Image (spheres, helix red, strand yellow):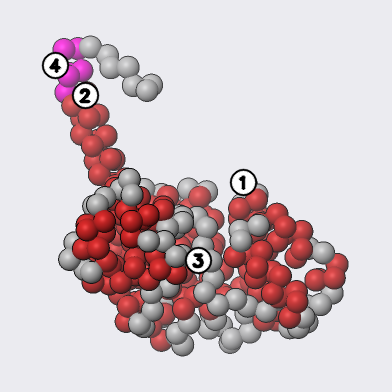
């Protein structure tokens, strides 16, 4: 983790939310330590990093697009969908998108792509079976008019499908679609929303217990974002990295404990009660 980049990112987000160093550090660390973190002199451990991110309102499964897409020629409709998405009001967003007025206002393939993407995002959070979101993200891909080359919305839909399959524990499919979302991304005209793709892939790997793969993708994402002189999604990636690190350490500890219990079971021929 780059100390300087992380500190700058943390400081910018803290200031954008009008949170003082004193308020952010309270209950987590000393204010001088937070100052050292923001000035690139110290990297927090995973527990402290998670605490700082949580205080800043950074969450694992609620992301906000940097730039939004038109779902209609009506500015009012597009703006309302954007606002509901940013506020994570997913039921209201779904109800709005499925209303007759909105459906009748969609004309172009790019509008349909945006429409299905927003609908897929709302369904992802509302439908535990994930069937509807899977279908919506597939419809985003069907509307792609870029001669087979995925535009940013198509890449986001591929990343969304990767996450859907990760939640379904379909690891092979999750990897397939996540990899497709990032394929030849260096040759794509840069948009900040592309930063999201690294997070989606890493988060999917995290859900499937692929901690090493998640950490590698996070590292690639941080490099991609900083190369394009952006900070969008950096804090989310740092937060996810801390979560991955914390979880992998816990898993290693659990594996060691299980190993020790097996040794005791063999030595003393005593059954271990494992339904904890």
Q: Residue at x 21, y 24 (%)?
A: 262
Tell me the SS state at disc 2.
Answer: helix
Q: Is residue 114 left or right of residue 192?
A: right
* Number of residues whose C-alpha sits closer than 10 Å to that of mark 2, classed few (under 14), some (14–19) or many (20 or more): some
Q: Earlier in the sequence, mark 4 or mark 1?
A: 1
Question: Residue 188's x, y, as percent?
Answer: 45, 85
**Residue corresponding to mark 3:** 159
Q: Nearer the viewer, mark 3 or mark 4?
A: 3
Q: Nearer the viewer, mark 3 or mark 2?
A: 3
Q: Which mark is residue 267?
A: 4
Tell me the SS state at disc 1.
Answer: loop
In the rendered image of this protein, does residue 261 appear above or below residue 147? above
Quarter of the picture containing the C terminus is top left
Q: Which region shows up in magenta?
A: 263-269
Q: Nearer the viewer, mark 4 or mark 1?
A: 1
**Residue corresponding to mark 2:** 262
Tell me the SS state at disc 3.
Answer: helix
In the rendered image of this protein, does residue 27 appear above or below residue 178? above
Question: Residue 117's x, y, as percent?
Answer: 63, 68
Q: Earlier in the sequence, mark 3 or mark 4?
A: 3
Tell me the SS state at disc 4.
Answer: helix
Q: Earlier in the sequence, mark 3 or mark 1?
A: 1
Question: Residue 21's x, y, as percent?
Answer: 33, 60
Compute the Cα span from label 2 to label 4: 9 Å
Nearer the observer, 95 or 55: 55
**Residue corresponding to mark 1:** 128
Visible in this render: residue 179?
A: no
In the rendered image of this protein, does residue 24 appear above or below residue 142? above
Compute the Cα span from label 4 to label 1: 45 Å
* Number of residues whose C-alpha sits closer than 10 Å to that of mark 1, classed few (under 14), some (14–19) or many (20 or more): few
* Number of residues whose C-alpha sits closer than 10 Å to that of mark 3, classed few (under 14), some (14–19) or many (20 or more): many
Q: Earlier in the sequence, mark 2 or mark 4?
A: 2
């Amino acid at each position: 983790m780059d100390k300087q980049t992380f500190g700058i990112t943390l400081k910018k987000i803290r200031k954008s939310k009008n949170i003082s160093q004193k308020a952010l550090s309270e209950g987590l660390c000393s204010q001088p330590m937070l100052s050292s973190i923001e000035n690139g002199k110290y990297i927090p451990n995973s527990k402290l990093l998670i605490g700082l991110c949580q205080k800043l309102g950074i969450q694992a499964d609620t992301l906000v697009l940097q730039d939004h897409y038109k779902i209609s020629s009506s500015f009012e409709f597009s703006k309302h969908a954007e606002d509901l998405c940013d506020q994570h009001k997913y039921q209201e967003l779904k109800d709005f998108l499925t209303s007759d007025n909105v459906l009748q206002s969609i004309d172009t393939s790019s509008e349909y792509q945006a429409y299905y993407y927003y609908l897929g995002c709302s369904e992802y959070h509302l439908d535990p079976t994930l069937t509807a979101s899977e279908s919506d993200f597939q419809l985003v891909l069907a509307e792609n008019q870029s001669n087979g080359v995925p535009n940013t919305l198509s890449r986001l839909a591929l990343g969304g499908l990767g996450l859907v399959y990760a939640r379904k524990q379909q690891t092979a499919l999750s990897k397939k679609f996540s990899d497709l979302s990032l394929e030849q991304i260096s040759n794509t005209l840069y948009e900040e929303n592309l930063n999201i793709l690294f997070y989606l892939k890493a988060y999917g790997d995290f859900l499937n217990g692929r901690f090493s793969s998640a950490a590698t993708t996070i590292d690639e994402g941080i490099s991609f974002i900083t190369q394009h002189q952006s900070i969008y999604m950096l804090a989310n990636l740092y937060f996810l990295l801390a979560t991955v690190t914390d979880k992998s350490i816990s898993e290693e500890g659990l594996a060691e404990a299980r190993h020790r219990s097996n040794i005791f079971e063999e030595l003393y021929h005593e059954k271990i009660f494992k339904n904890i």
